[in-house]
Image (tube, grey):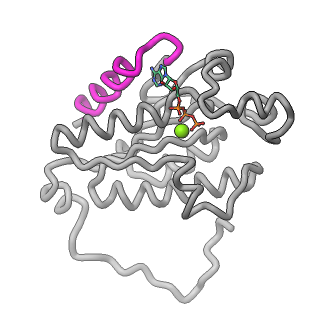
Amino acid sequence: MTSTQSTNITWHAGSIGRADRERLLGQKGVTVWLTGLSGSGKSTIAVAVEAALIRRGRCAYVLDGDNIRHGLNQNLGFSPEDRTENIRRIGEVAKLFTDAGMIVITSFISPYRADRDAVRALMDEGYFVEVLVDASLETCESRDVKGLYQKARAGEIPEFTGISAPYEPPLDPELVLDTNRESIEESTEKLLRLLDKRG
Ligand SMILES: Nc1ncnc2c1ncn2[C@@H]1O[C@H](COP(=O)(O)OP(=O)(O)OP(=O)(O)O)[C@@H](O)[C@H]1O
Ligand SMILES: [Mg+2]
């Protein structure tokens, strides 16, 4: 599914570049890629950071795992192949949003290192910020926000990350948020500070 199927296609360049859009919006586009176990806090942090940015007059937009699976990726499941395709499509969408000048915050488990690295490779240097939302399996399981761990332990959800499917943490993320110890406010502040620092 990842190779280009069409042959008679030509890239049509626009007359407006990224710099024009960034000048118009008064901000630099970026993709902030949150990765971590289910229940680690990706969606919570994404939503809080988005709200804080909007309050500051920034254009920000969350792409959230479950939400995207309701629409764009509703034909994908949780097999390794589908997970890879899920992330590939999101990567392409995030790239478009970033090019449009948005601060994109993605919240997907995105368990495979190679898939995240492929998204990084799509983006220009500095436009992809990988954030490990780090919480132990015990912490996530004790939160069990959606009751999924209980179902996974009961064998009702196959290929559940952390239980019956692997999670590969990033080796060199731009930021680690330890949500075992940090409050939601602390994690949100840390991420906002990083974005400030990077302009
Ligand atoms: N520092 C923190 N940052 C984020 N969430 C935290 C933090 N501390 C505690 N929590 C709690 O952890 C839970 C995280 O749930 P959330 O739905 O955000 O996880 P998720 O990573 O998006 O999971 P999924 O992959 O299943 O969508 C929430 O109940 C939140 O209140
Ligand atoms: Mg979530």
**In this view, 46 is above or below 98:** above
Q: Is residue 195 magenta?
A: yes
Residue at 21% x, 71% y is 16
Q: Position of residue 39 (x, y in %)?
A: 58, 29
The picture places residue 6, in percent across and down from the top left corner, at: 60, 83
> For the C terminus, which image quadrant?
top left
- Magenta stretch: residue 20 in it? no
Q: What is the magenta range?
A: 179-198
| Extreme residue toward the top, this view | 181
Q: Is residue 195 left or right of residue 35?
A: left
Instruction: State how many labels appear.
Output: 0
Instruction: Using the image as rendered, state which of residue 132 and residue 137 is in the foreground.
Output: 137
> Mostly what secondary structure, the magenta segment?
helix
Residue found at the very far right of the displayed protein: 155
- Residue pictured at 43% horizontal, 26% vertical: 175
Q: Is residue 43 above or below residue 91?
A: above
x 72%, y 35%: residue? 161
- 169 left or right, relative to 53: right
In the displayed orientation, state which residue is furthest to the bottom.
8
**Quadrant including the N terminus:** bottom right
Up/down of 88 relative to 156, above or below: below
Side (left or right) of 140 relative to 26: right
Q: Is residue 71 left or right of residue 158?
A: left
Q: Residue at x 33, y 22 (%)?
A: 190
Give residue 15's quadrant in the image.
bottom left
Residue 90 % position (x, y): 52, 55
